[in-house]
Amino acid sequence: MAPVINHNLPLDLDTIEDQGLDDDPHASNSDSDAGSMDEESLSDGELETVDDIDPEFILHQQLAEDEVHSGEQDDAHIVPINLVWRALSPLLRDLSLLAELDHPDLQGIPTIHSNQKVTTRPHLHSGYIEICSASLDRLSRRSQRLNDVNINSGALLLQHLFHQAPSAAQCAIFSSFDIHLARYDRPSADVWRQTKMTEYWTKVVWIIPVHCDVSEHWVVVVVYPSARRILLYDSLAAGPEDCQETFKEITELVDKLTVAAAENGHQKLLLDSQWQGNPLLDQAVQTLTYSCGLWVLALVAAILRGYHVPGVVEQDLEQFKQLLYRWALTLPPTS
């Protein structure tokens, strides 16, 4: 039993402008659902259109041409970054997430809370998805704020469920604890040991959940290493003055990740080239005090499925949470 998958747009911002376009009657703009790619279009490397315009091409152009940036560059950073504080558009919104997560058999799943564990799919991640009974308790309760265990296991569970989507295999999902590697300036050996299971050096997209300790708020950062882009999804749409520390820590983490990969025989990124950071939202989508973690997981699902941002509204998040809870119950209990 697995969700029905739409095979949507890959998210390589560097190569998108070189790919061919086909008219697709099911294609959409940023306010409607994206269509699917068939096997032939995948093999030909062609993308569907959105009103005869490739939104990824527009997104790439905006990232490359925008010269307006805020804040000063910190000379202590190895990764130079310009913060361009405006949301990008047009963005593909994932409007079909709830429908594709839903499944009639989920309603008959016994609600027994035990420790659940499953091996991750080898082409996605090396390791396990583990969900403890306390995490299931938290997922099952309405209006319950998600914690780091929910976020990390939930992100891996979504990648496990959407494994057939081409974009899912292009994504490395990091733990929310990985930001501590930068925050506490851990050595390369620690960085490698803690992150190598993601095989991030082979991936097009890096997804990094971040907990902002001061504000007790969850955000998620999407890194396109080959395009040198860092995109921030903050459901409260805070301004640049509130997010500079997150960008600083992410650039430091990017540096540590590339150094660790290079020390273990993998190609190092061009860290001395200019990077660019943007928000994915310029208006808040969150009004509830406890929903930030659910917005993070909704963004993770959208990226894995080939979109840019979630298409759900806040009223949908409780259903999203309950669907995740039901899927978590389908994992085998530990012996």
Image: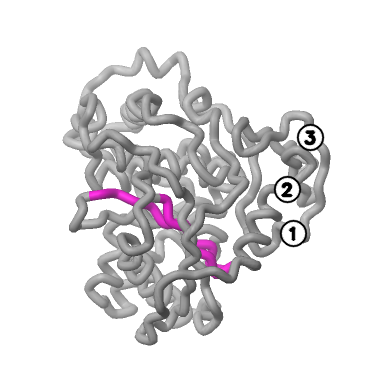
Confirm whether residue 264 shows in the render.
no
Mark 1 and mark 2 in contact? Answer it, CB < 8 Å: yes
User: How far across and down, in percent of the image, does residue 21 sit?
Assistant: 81, 47
Specify the segment rendered in magenta: 217-233
Q: Secondary structure at mark 3?
A: loop
In primary-sequence order, the first of circles 3 and 2 is 3
Q: Secondary structure at mark 2?
A: loop
Q: Residue at x 58, y 48 (%)?
A: 167
User: How far across and down, in percent of the image, does residue 186 sit?
Assistant: 26, 76
* Cα distance in 3D space between marks 1 and 2: 8 Å
Amino acid found under the numbered disc labelled 2: Asp
Q: Residues within 10 Å of mark 1 (few under 14, many from 20)?
A: some
In primary-sequence order, the first of circles 1 and 3 is 1
Query: Was residue 168 drawn as part of the magenta stretch in this picture?
Result: no
Closer mark to the observer between disc 3 and disc 2: 2
User: How far across and down, in percent of the image, does residue 294 sit?
Assistant: 34, 38
Q: Can you identify the residue that label 3 sits on?
A: 24
In the picture, residue 15 is in which quadrant? bottom right
Q: Can you identify the residue that label 1 sits on?
A: 17
Mark 3 and mark 2 in contact? Answer it, CB < 8 Å: no
Amino acid found under the numbered disc labelled 3: Asp
Amino acid found under the numbered disc labelled 1: Glu
User: How far across and down, in percent of the image, does residue 181 sit?
Assistant: 28, 70
Q: Secondary structure at mark 1?
A: helix
Query: In the rendering, which numbered label is found on residue 28?
Result: none
Task: Label the magenta part by its dominant secondary structure.
Answer: strand
Query: In the rendering, which numbered label is found on residue 54?
Result: 2
Mark 1 and mark 3 in contact? Answer it, CB < 8 Å: no
In primary-sequence order, the first of circles 1 and 2 is 1
Q: Residues within 10 Å of mark 3 (few under 14, many from 20)?
A: some
Confirm whether residue 256 shows in the render.
yes
* Cα distance in 3D space between marks 1 and 3: 18 Å
